[in-house]
Amino acid sequence: MDERADCIFCRIADGKIKSNILYQDEELLAFPDINPLAPTHILIIPRKHIASVAEMPTQDAHLIGDMAKLAKKLAGDNGIAEKGFRLVINNGPEGGQGVNHLHMHLLGGRQLGSKLG
Amino acid sequence: MDERADCIFCRIADGKIKSNILYQDEELLAFPDINPLAPTHILIIPRKHIASVAEMPTQDAHLIGDMAKLAKKLAGDNGIAEKGFRLVINNGPEGGQGVNHLHMHLLGGRQLGSKLG
């Protein structure tokens, strides 16, 4: 199955594409967004290839909780836990999902707007 | 402790403020945002008063996974699972958090923008 070979985030998780890995464990990975929309803009992904929330198996939902817990830690590491930050998961075309591998955006370091998209 | 009495989302969860409850169980609640930013704009909250992700106890992180699972179901109910949707959790002042009770926005029903705030 070439799913992992065809997915840029799987390739980052597998070390096939170099990235500035900010955090990793057996389940999750975090690295900077290459097109940052804010002074802090980090992507958090599961190693497992899950295309989106809409296609997430029920038994994998705990990963989203773990991603949020990691976002909290990274917000602290980046000095934005108290000032504030935003977590975003885009899903599918109208959601603006850019890569079809589940990912959470952690954005902060400036006043974020109120439109949410 | 008047924490619940002073929190508008706790008051909705406790039935003290009427809302159009779209879903509820012993843990979570979903209702429409009163200032919708998209054709579908639903808020998902835990009944438990947690101020934000930054103040979320580690043992409550699973709630965010459960909120995402519920968002997936509500996206299906609203016919936006395939077209796409966005999940947003604002945290603290620079994150644009409007109510200091953890909540996830489910937005969809139109093409969402790429700025994320």
Image: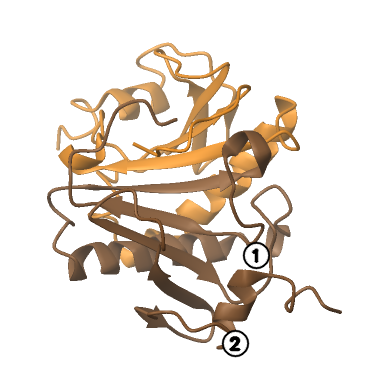
Chain colours: A orange, B brown
Q: Earlier in the sequence, mark 1 or mark 2?
A: 2
**Numbered tag placed on residue B60 in the rendering:** 1
The answer to which image quadrant residue A1 occupies is top left
Question: Residue B111, relative to residue B107: is it above or below?
Answer: above
In this view, the residue farthest toward the right is B1
Quarter of the rendering occupied by the C terminus of chain B? top left
Q: Position of residue A103 (x, y in %)?
A: 39, 38
Say above or below: A117 vs B75.
above
Q: Amino acid at mark 1?
A: Asp
Q: Position of residue A61 (x, y in %)?
A: 41, 60
* A31 relative to B32, above or below: above
Q: Is residue B32 left or right of residue B75?
A: right
Q: Callout 2: helix, strand or loop?
A: loop
Seen at 39% across and 59% down, the residue is A60
Position above or below: B117 against A90: above
Mark 1 and 2 residues: CB-CB less than 8 Å, in contact? no
Marks 1 and 2: which is nearer the front?
2
Q: Is residue A48 left or right of residue A83?
A: left
Picture quarter with the N terminus of chain B: bottom right
Q: Residue placed at 59% from the left, 77% from the top?
A: B47
Give residue B61's quadrant in the image.
bottom right
Dot 1: element? helix
* 3D distance between C-alphas at marks 1 and 2: 24 Å
* Residue marked by disc 2: B16
Please name the amino acid that badge 2 sits on: Lys
Q: For the image shown, how many numbered marks are present on the structure? A: 2
Instruction: Check if mark 1 and mark 2 are on a common chain.
Output: yes
Q: Chain of mark 1?
A: B
